[in-house]
Image (cartoon, rainbow, N blue to C red):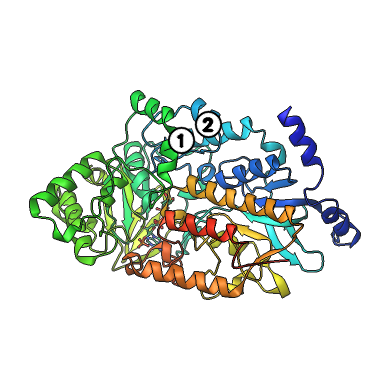
Amino acid sequence: MRLGSRAARARRSAFGPSVVSAAMSSGNGARSDGHEAQAHDVVVVGAGFAGMYMLHKLRDLGFDAVVVERADDVGGTWYWNRYPGARCDVESMQYSYSFDPELEQEWEWSERYSGQPEILRYANHVADKYDLRRDIRFETTVTAVDWDDDARQWHLQTDRGPYRARFVVMATGCLSTANVPQFEGAETFEGPTYHTGRWPHEGVDFDGKSVAVIGTGSSAVQAIPVIAAECRELTVFQRTPNYSVPARNQPLDPIEKADWKANYRELRARMVTEPAAMVLRLPGSEDLAKEASDDEFARRMEQRWAVGGFTFYRAYGDIALDAESNDRVAEFVRRKIAEVVHDPEVAAKLTPHNTIACKRPCLDTHYYETFNEPHVNLVDVSATPIERISPAGVVVDGTEYPVDAIVYATGFDAMTGTLLRMNITGRGGVRLADHWDAGPRTYLGLGVAGFPNMFTVSGPGSPSVLTNMIPSIEQHVDWIARCLVDLRERSTTVIEAEPDAEAYWVDHVNAVADLTLYPTCNSWYLGANIPGKTRVFMPLPGFPPYVEICEDVASDNYRGFALA
Ligand code: NA7
């Protein structure tokens, strides 16, 4: 009954026949190659967790929506990042959708933190349960997105034909464009190469092989112990040492799982009152680390180290704010590295000296311990960068390290990379790449001035990557859906961020970031990992105040957006 009525509603355009028929009759629907553009109320780009929920929500509300996705199945991040050891750093009972209590109750997570295969199975389960695939066009890559001011709609070009829509929702993920450094001679390497974010679905076997891993970020920290266990010899090329805290992964305690399931509503409500949209195993403290006595500090940090996970970083309220407190916590981790790693020279190389947690914090399972293995080597490339890749291996400072395979754990062009590669052109032919020349500019991380009817999910300027992504995604999708319903009810067809509101928001995000220690090191949050990328802190710290502002803006007739 419910499905039937939804299908019936979905058959017509939620904005009436005007979108489709006007566009068709304007002649804009036909491509020169004769392909007729598919017309929809909304085209969603990306079928990860954001795109899947957006589609489900839009269909439920009676909109005619379609998703285009470059992969051949759902899952987004969890479709692509299949590297050995890939695992979510957010605990599994919290890294899941909250929108349907039935889904919450029926799905069984097996570990404290879910591995990639289990999360991908969950994504597939969601796609099956809500019959999402019928409105997802797989293996379809968007090549251009142009706003048509006369027809008040977007034209999307894809490698599988054109689309038209009143609205576009960019559910393209924050870490979806791989960063592969352009090492001289890379193409001459005779063995296989892999990027962690574009890992093949099958056929990777490191048994008996000598493997290079380039990079020591979150992905490498997860992959290195697992690859080391598989291969004959592992050589890690490290440019910047990283702080990592034990994850303490383990099978999920059935009592804990039952407790979450019995109290999901209350716990979900609590999650969204937390700065990173997740409930920690030990409550965050507002105490100041620099004021704690030595005994108290040691007791508290040891306790959090033993519990594992992000709770470590909330031991004190000023870790992300005060350099002295931050260094006290950093020193605690440095001492742990020295305790764990047997060879003092290796320990020294693995020891970071920058601000802790200003790069994306890593959680691990036996990361530092892995460097005690006799077949694991560490090459410091901080002072002497990788010179080139030879047919046989990696060359640093004139020394060739021969390997059978190279793993690039070199990260992503985060938050803006995928959006900019889509060739988006807004009002007056302005390119998004030009509008964002000095760094991304958004209003609330949801809209961009000059780019009407385009929404970004967890875009730059929103808390996104500083939070548990699924609640952040749900908050954005719910906001966008509410907005589209409000526009439909008011027969409003265009919504666009006002330049002043956008400018105010960019300043606000910078001002909040400047209160923290985040801008003090070269992280992908700042775009500092991509040569030539403008250095701007992209996400907004603090989930609860952000949610409040979004609610307030919507309730105040979408303050800061122009409605036409
Ligand atoms: P990251 O955190 O950006 O890590 C990339 C790593 O690659 C990092 O250690 C970089 O060193 C290193 N890197 C990048 N370019 C080079 C070159 N040219 N030479 C040597 N080393 C290099 O990406 P991840 O995939 O690990 O993490 C992203 C995840 O964060 C995401 O999947 C979420 O799980 C959270 P650097 O520090 O820049 O000196």
Query: 335 above or below 437?
Result: above
| Image location of residue 394, percent across then percent down | 38, 58
Q: In the displayed structure, does residue 128 sit left or right of residue 509?
A: right
Q: In the displayed structure, does residue 346 sit left or right of residue 389?
A: left
Residue 265 numbered tag: 1
Query: 433 above or below 281?
Result: below
In the depicted view, which residue is nearer to us: 94 or 491?
A: 491
Report if residue 485 is visible in the image: yes
Quadrant in the picture for residue 433: bottom right
**Badge 1 residue CB within 8 Å of ligand 1:** no
Query: 472 above or below 180?
Result: above
Q: Amino acid at mark 1?
A: Arg
The kind of secondary structure element at disc 2 is helix
Name which of mark 1 and mark 2 comes first in the sequence.
2
In the depicted view, which residue is nearer to us: 320 or 383?
A: 320
Real-space CA distance between mark 1 and mark 2, rounded to the nearest whole angstrom: 9 Å
Q: Amino acid at mark 2?
A: Pro
Residue at (56%, 41%) from the top-left corner?
75
Q: In the displayed structure, does residue 500 sit left or right of residue 494?
A: left
Residue 101 numbered tag: 2
The kind of secondary structure element at disc 1 is helix
Query: 171 above or below 503?
Result: above
Query: Quick check: marks 1 and 2 in contact, CB under 8 Å?
Result: yes
Residue 512 numbered tag: none
Report if residue 30 is visible in the image: no
Pick out the residue farthest to the front: 556
Q: For label 1, count other residues whose C-alpha is less than 10 Å away and answer few (under 14), some (14-19) or many (20+).
A: few
* Image quadrant where one finds the C terminus: bottom right
Marks counted in the figure total: 2
Quadrant in the picture for residue 49: top right
